[in-house]
């Protein structure tokens, strides 16, 4: 079981209301130069978006190092931002020749090594949040706790959480580990978290929910796009801002992770913070998203 001292010291992390995702900044999409990394980080910070979401596998294990190269040029930025990363996926790529099949690994050895790799690549002394990326069916919660306690007590990781877990998997982990964050898919294209217990659990247990793909990857169903477009015209903003405002308004405190490569999309996302939907507007979007009229 988790040491009581570790549980008492642990606190849920502070993160900006809109989180900036870096998955597409590197070789998986935009192929940013160091200068472009600098510009996007600076733009996000200027908009109050101080939290940056990473994973060790992004860019086939190269994006963290590219981000770190930009961060090294501005050491004053580190105290002004929060770095979130994820570990636990055995990703097959040229950069990892020993990996021959997709798998998950929450062993103590893997978690500790992943943390050290992320610290080195991001060129930082600590990570604000470290998440277990996808559930490992072979997870031993006591072993995870041992790894997290070492990382926390050494000051290398300040908060811990999970990504893409079920409520029962979180409960199992909570028997040894204080879970502070749950990153899961939520958008107008995937509303399952609203009624499958995951957001309820976040509210009950004080877990911060982060929404990946909060805009559903684009290409929205016609009915959803029509509703968002109508409300966007009413509020004088983009449909994307309405979709984000819809998430932000949920009482669980959802933090959308904006995975954009364009500065103007960060600006558009920032406007969502000032939009207040009434209940009828909120449920109009919900019914369009589910395709089902409320009983």
Image (cartoon, rainbow, N blue to C red):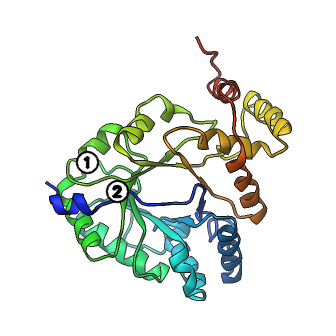
Q: Nearer the N terminus, badge 1 or badge 2?
A: 2
Q: Nearer the viewer, residue 146 or 99?
A: 146
Which image quadrant: the C terminus? top right
Q: Position of residue 1 (x, y in %)?
A: 13, 54
Q: Which mark is residue 174?
A: 1
Q: Position of residue 77 (x, y in %)?
A: 57, 80
- Is residue 109 rendered to the left or right of residue 276? left
- Is residue 155 rendered to the left or right of residue 285? left
Residue 35 lies, with reference to residue 258, above or below; the image says: below
Q: Position of residue 207 (x, y in %)?
A: 39, 48
Residue 169 lies, with reference to residue 78, above or below; the image says: above
Q: Nearer the viewer, residue 23 or 75?
A: 75
- Tag 2 secondary structure: strand
What residue occupies the far bottom of the structure in this picture? Answer: 73
- Visible in this render: residue 234? yes
Label 1, label 2: how many angstroms apart (C-alpha)? Answer: 19 Å
- Is residue 168 rendered to the left or right of residue 83? left
Per the image, the residue denoted by label 2 is: 104
- Disc 1 + disc 2, Cβ < 8 Å: no
- Tag 1 secondary structure: helix
- Crowding at mark 2 (Cα within 10 Å: few <14, some 14-19, many 20+): many
Q: Which mark is residue 124?
A: none
């Amino acid at each position: 079981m988790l040491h009581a001292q570790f549980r008492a010291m642990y606190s849920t992390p502070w993160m900006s209301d809109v989180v900036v995702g870096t998955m597409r900044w590197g070789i998986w999409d935009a192929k940013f130069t160091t200068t472009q990394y600098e510009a996007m980080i600076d733009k996000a910070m200027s908009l109050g978006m101080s939290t940056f979401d990473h994973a060790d596998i992004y860019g086939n294990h190269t994006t963290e190092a590219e981000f770190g190269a930009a961060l090294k040029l501005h050491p004053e930025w580190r105290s002004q931002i929060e770095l979130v990363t994820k570990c636990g996926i055995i990703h097959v790529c040229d950069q990892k020749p020993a990996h021959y099949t997709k798998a998950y690994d929450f062993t103590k050895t893997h978690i500790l090594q992943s943390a050290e790799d992320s610290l080195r690549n991001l060129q930082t002394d600590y990570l604000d949040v470290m998440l277990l990326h996808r559930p490992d069916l072979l997870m031993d919660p006591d072993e995870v706790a041992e790894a997290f306690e070492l990382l926390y007590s050494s000051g290398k990781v300040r908060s811990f959480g999970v990504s893409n877990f079920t409520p029962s998997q979180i409960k199992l982990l909570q028997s040894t580990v204080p879970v502070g964050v749950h990153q899961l898919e939520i958008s107008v294209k995937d509303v399952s978290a609203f009624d499958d217990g995951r957001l309820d659990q976040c509210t009950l247990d004080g877990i911060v929910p982060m929404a990946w793909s909060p805009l559903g990857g684009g290409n929205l169903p016609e009915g959803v796009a029509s509703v968002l477009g109508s409300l966007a015209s009413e509020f004088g903003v983009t449909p994307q801002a309405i979709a984000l405002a819809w998430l932000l308004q949920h009482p669980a405190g959802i933090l959308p992770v904006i995975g954009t490569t364009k500065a103007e999309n960060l600006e558009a996302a920032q406007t969502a913070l000032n939009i207040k939907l009434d209940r009828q507007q909120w449920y109009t979007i919900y019914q369009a998203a589910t395709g089902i009229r409320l009983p």
